[in-house]
Image (spheres, rainbow, N blue to C red):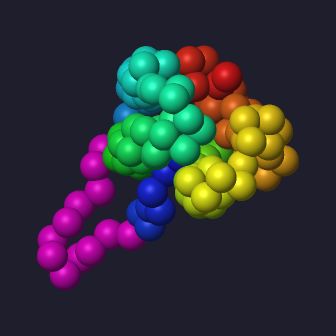
Amino acid sequence: MLILAVTGALSFATGAVAAKPLTVSQFRTQANAACSNAYKQIAGLSHSSLAVYIAGALPITRSFEASVARLTEPAAFAVPFGKLISTLTAEDAQLQKLYVRAKGGHLTIAQFQNDTTMTGLSRTEDSLWSTMGVSVCAG
């Protein structure tokens, strides 16, 4: 999946405060629900063309990413969660590049399915989710 960039910075000037971190159980439950929802939406996309499919996937994955970014991870997950956010951001950038190629007629389904950049990012994402015990998201 893909993610919007998250800074994690607090704005003391505006009086913003950090949300209380979720428990491990709460984090896993909310992340699994977000993944399940995104997977269901992706499954309903049109396959009329690769460009149409990717164009439909982008807003779904970006909504998913925003949902994930709003989670306040438990302290034990700070490092893998930070890496996950970076990975999702990179996936979004790669999916956008693939969309441009597909829209221009320069990307086959096989090339899309075997894109080494996306495949590597997806494996990293799955591993990070697995590290945090988020089974629905872990592949």
Q: Position of residue 20 (x, y in %)?
A: 30, 44
Q: Is residue 19 visible?
A: yes
78, 112: nearer the viewer: 112
Is 45 situated above or below 1?
Answer: above
**Residue 52 location in percent, x, y?**
48, 40
Q: Can you name the residue that lies furthest to the bottom here?
A: 13
- In the image, 30: left or right of 102? left
Residue 17 included in the magenta stretch of the image? yes
Between 21 and 121, the one nearer to me in the picture: 121
Q: Is residue 23 visible?
A: no
Name the residue located 46 percent from the left edge and 45 percent from the top edge: 55
User: In which quadrant of the rendered view does residue 9 lie?
Assistant: bottom left
Q: Which secondary structure is most common in the magenta stretch?
A: loop
Figure check: 24 above or below 40: below
Which residue is at a point 60% across and 18% down the rendered structure image? 135
The boundaries of the magenta stretch are 9-20
